[in-house]
Amino acid sequence: MGDPKKQRKKFETPRFPWRTDILGSELKLLGQYGLRNKRELWRHKTMLSKFRGSARSILGMPEREGAKSKEQLLNRLDRLGILPETAVLDDVLDLMIEDILERRLQSLVFQKGLAKSVYQARQLITHGHIAISGRKVNSPSYLVLREEIAHIEYSPTSALINSNHPLRRSLMSIPSTTETEESPGE
């Protein structure tokens, strides 16, 4: 079980950390999903690696032995919303890091329009303004379950629950790109 005072790393670092293509792709993902540092990215990459590794080991087992493990893995990925319910084990091997990063609370708060940017979404979450089913969640990296997506909202104790709050009014006044574009002939 281990000593709770002695924390373990939850991530694996890249094998070749100074390759420019890896550095560039990591930096792009950090900006796109509003991650704080590369350790957050590496933690999700390690999680993806473990999903894929277990799928490979299940594929190598005889059919009867791996049936229960296969069902458990697919059910877990379905609950997380990473894979659809009709997915097969080969779909686990096709997963990308973006599939997991899209399921983070920070990304979903931004997609639902509760924040102007992924960075503001992170700030709202850490300051306690976001709740799932009325329960505050302070971790931007929380992986939201499929059934919890509809219940992401402002916290009942937050000042943002008031629709006249300046942040809420500014979110409503953001024009869409089609309204702001003018035709060249005008």
Image (spheres, rainbow, N blue to C red):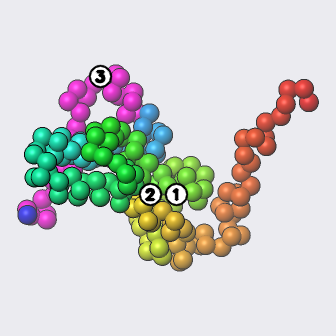
Residue at position x 32%, y 42% from top?
Answer: 91
- Residue at the disc numbered 2: 105
Residue 148 on the magenta span: no
Query: Label 2, label 3: how many angstroms apart (C-alpha)?
Result: 30 Å
Tell me the crowding category of disc 2: few under 14, some 14 to 19, or many 20 or more residues within 10 angstroms, Cα based: many
The spot of residue 87 in percent (x, y) is 34, 48
Q: Nearer the viewer, residue 165 or 174?
A: 174
Give the magenta part as a residue range.
2-27
Residue at position x 29%, y 22% from top?
Answer: 19
Quadrant of the snapshot with the C terminus: top right
Instruction: For marks 2 and 3, give the one nearer the viewer.
Output: 2
Residue at position x 46%, y 69% from top?
Answer: 132
Secondary structure of the residue carrying tag 3 is loop
The spot of residue 16 in percent (x, y) is 23, 26
168 relative to 23 in the view: left or right: right
- Residue at the disc numbered 1: 109
Q: Earlier in the sequence, mark 2 or mark 3?
A: 3
Residue at position x 10%, y 52% from top?
Answer: 65
Secondary structure of the residue carrying tag 2 is helix
Tell me the crowding category of disc 3: few under 14, some 14 to 19, or many 20 or more residues within 10 angstroms, Cα based: few
User: With respect to residue 31, does 117 lie above or below?
Assistant: below
The spot of residue 77 in percent (x, y) is 32, 54
Q: Nearer the viewer, residue 71 or 151?
A: 71
The spot of residue 98 in percent (x, y) is 40, 41
Query: Label 1, label 3: how many angstroms apart (C-alpha)?
Result: 33 Å
Q: Amino acid at mark 1?
A: Val
- Residue at the disc numbered 3: 19
